[in-house]
Amino acid sequence: MTILIVDDIATNRKLLRVNLEGEGYHILEAADGNEALNVLTHEPVEAVISDVLMPNMDGFQLCLEIRKNYRLCALPFIIYTSTYTSPDDFRLGQTIGADRFLIKPAPMSDILKAVREVLEKQKWRPVFAPPAEEESVVLKQYNQALVNKLQEKNTDLTEAMEKLQRANESITQLNSDLELRVTARTADLETANLDLSRALANVKELKGLLPICGYCKKIRDDQDYWQTVERYLIEHTSANFSHGICPECFEIHVKPDLIKHGIKGVRGPGGKMAP
């Protein structure tokens, strides 16, 4: 049993083919109505499953051409579409002789059921060949369906354009707000950086009044902690230290210790020899 799948999207054809082949059907494929008619000219086919919206020749026109062909007019035809789904589209499908009208994506069970039913009823279905005076009515319905779909697509496009415009306006406003916030934040950071630079300069210059203990000579900081002069200077300036002995301390403290321990020949501050 051979079924012809007509769809311009290869993925859709592959999905149907795999499932139908799993049920034992032999599958042929076509990408539009013209290709489908060419296949039907050279290959025996028992049923057609066709999309509607396709290039070159759509599914409605394909069905109508099949019904007008004496050799093919009894061929079961299933419309399978996701775009032409209005009541007028259903009526047009019936008018041109489609046996079933399925909306994508349909469960595979529904597709298989439709295939079995159209194949079973094929022997009893009447030959569809609209007289010339009725064919104009069919074409009128067909053209109206195309106009309706064009209007629907135009409405969708207009709505999409409006959404894009609103989104663009929103993005523009957000960018403007962001620029203002960045500018304000940059100014705040520059002000804070300037204040910090001034504070560091003041600290390094040790301006102001420093409370110093009259006995141990420790300095009280702004947290009310007492520190040695050396520790305070290390924390509040960038100066480095080298330790030495002043002449007065040498005479008062060092020299007596040297004499006490019998050490001679040591030079004091300024190169003066200790006795």
Image (spheres, rainbow, N blue to C red):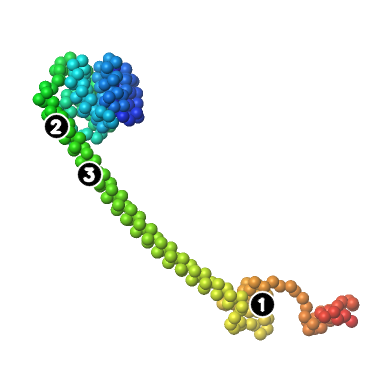
- Identify the disc placed on residue 155: 3
Q: Residue at x 27, y 18 (%)?
A: 40
Q: Residue at x 69, y 71 (%)?
A: 240
Locate residue 185, reporting x and y percent. Answer: 44, 65
Q: Residue at x 18, y 16 (%)?
A: 70
- Identify the disc placed on residue 140: 2
Q: Amino acid at mark 3?
A: Thr
The tag earlier along the polypeptide, 1 or 3, is 3
Locate residue 242, reporting x and y percent. Answer: 74, 73
Residue placed most toward the observer, 213 or 204: 204
Badge 2: residue crowd in 10 Å (few <14, some 14–19, many ≥20)? few
Badge 3: residue crowd in 10 Å (few <14, some 14–19, many ≥20)? few
Residue 150: image quadrant is top left
The quarter of the image holding the C terminus is bottom right
Residue placed most toward the observer, 72 or 250: 72
Locate residue 83, reporting x and y percent. Answer: 24, 35
Residue under pointer 1: 229
Q: CA distance from mark 3 to mark 2?
A: 22 Å
- Identify the disc placed on residue 238: none
